[in-house]
Amino acid sequence: MSYDNACKYLAEEYPTDFVRWLLEVETEDINVLKTELFLEPIRADSVTFLQTANRILHLEFQTEPVSKPPIPFRMGDYSFRLKRKYQCPVTQVVIFLQETTNEIAFTEEYRDETTIHRYRVIRLWEQDSALFLNNRGLLPLAPLTRTDSATALLSQVAQTVATISDITEQQNITGCLGILAGLRFDRDLIRQFLREDIMRQSVIYQDIVQKEAFRLISRLINRRFREVDLSLIERIRTLSTEQLEDLGEAILDFSNVADLVAFLNQQNV
């Protein structure tokens, strides 16, 4: 899911670039919608909703064509919910990151006995790299676009990112680039072009590390104590990566859930 998270970060941090690319309009009046559209809990880290003055742009990033529920059905479901809630037109785009021949990546509609719903599909490996190289928010996607020399393209993108003067922005763009480039290149080649220390300082990298640490700690706790109150799990979720590492070591000395509660109290969470 790290690839999806990187794309979601880019779309929400640089919405103007995505609106310019996909809606072909120039506007700074864009609102990133943080909304719950589901009747039941669904993990949808790859979904982003951008609202312009008179339209919603729904983006869904995919590395795999197979999902539950299937992508075509899900797009129809999202569309109806968005229209009911916001009463405005919706443009939907599914962006496939990794090259595939699966028919879902070439399907642009949901169809059943009574309904036909259409949406757009973009296959990054067919896209001209020029647009992505000229828009900062799209730069990390550039290595996945069409090219005669993938290695030369990665080198060009890395050189462009290195010219970003704001160090925090450079770190975050580099982090996203390092993650997404992994869909096309092996890790050793990526390290030749990108400084790993800069990637590790990016917010997206730190977020992924924190989430992975949380998943590991959650498994350890559930295995050690079987059933743990959900309120404790939510408190653990708020811990920093460093605190999660400390908890991972402390668990070895815990005798019961009360020890876990005491640790969380010490962390003021």
Image (cartoon, grey):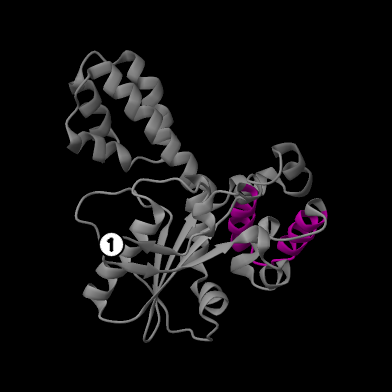
> Which one is in front, 167 or 2?
2
> Which one is in front, 117 or 75?
117
Residue 198 visible in the picture: yes
| Residue at figure coordinates x 33%, y 49% from the top left | 69
How many marks can you see? 1
Rendering coords of residue 15 (x, y %): 49, 72
Left/right placement of residue 244 relative to residue 113 reads right
The single residue placed furthest to the front in the displayed view is 113
Kindly indicate the quadrant of the structure image that contains residue 132. Answer: bottom right
Kindly indicate the quadrant of the structure image that contains residue 157. Answer: bottom right
Rendering coords of residue 21 (x, y %): 57, 75
Residue 6 visible in the picture: no
Left/right placement of residue 96 relative to residue 252 reads right
161 within the magenta span: yes
Left/right placement of residue 88 relative to residue 104 reads left
| Residue at figure coordinates x 65%, y 64% from the top left | 139
Rendering coords of residue 88 (x, y %): 30, 82
Left/right placement of residue 86 relative to residue 14 reads left
Query: Is label 1 in a helix, a strand or a loop?
Result: loop
Rendering coords of residue 115 (x, y %): 29, 67
Give, as a single range, the part of the protein colored magenta: 152-178
Residue tagged 1: 113
- Please, what is the three-letter code of the amino acid marked with disc 1? Glu
Kindly indicate the quadrant of the structure image that contains residue 125. Answer: bottom right
The answer to whether 233 is drawn above or below residue 6 in the figure is: above
111 within the magenta span: no
> Which one is in front, 179 or 106?
106
| Residue at figure coordinates x 46%, y 47% from the top left | 207
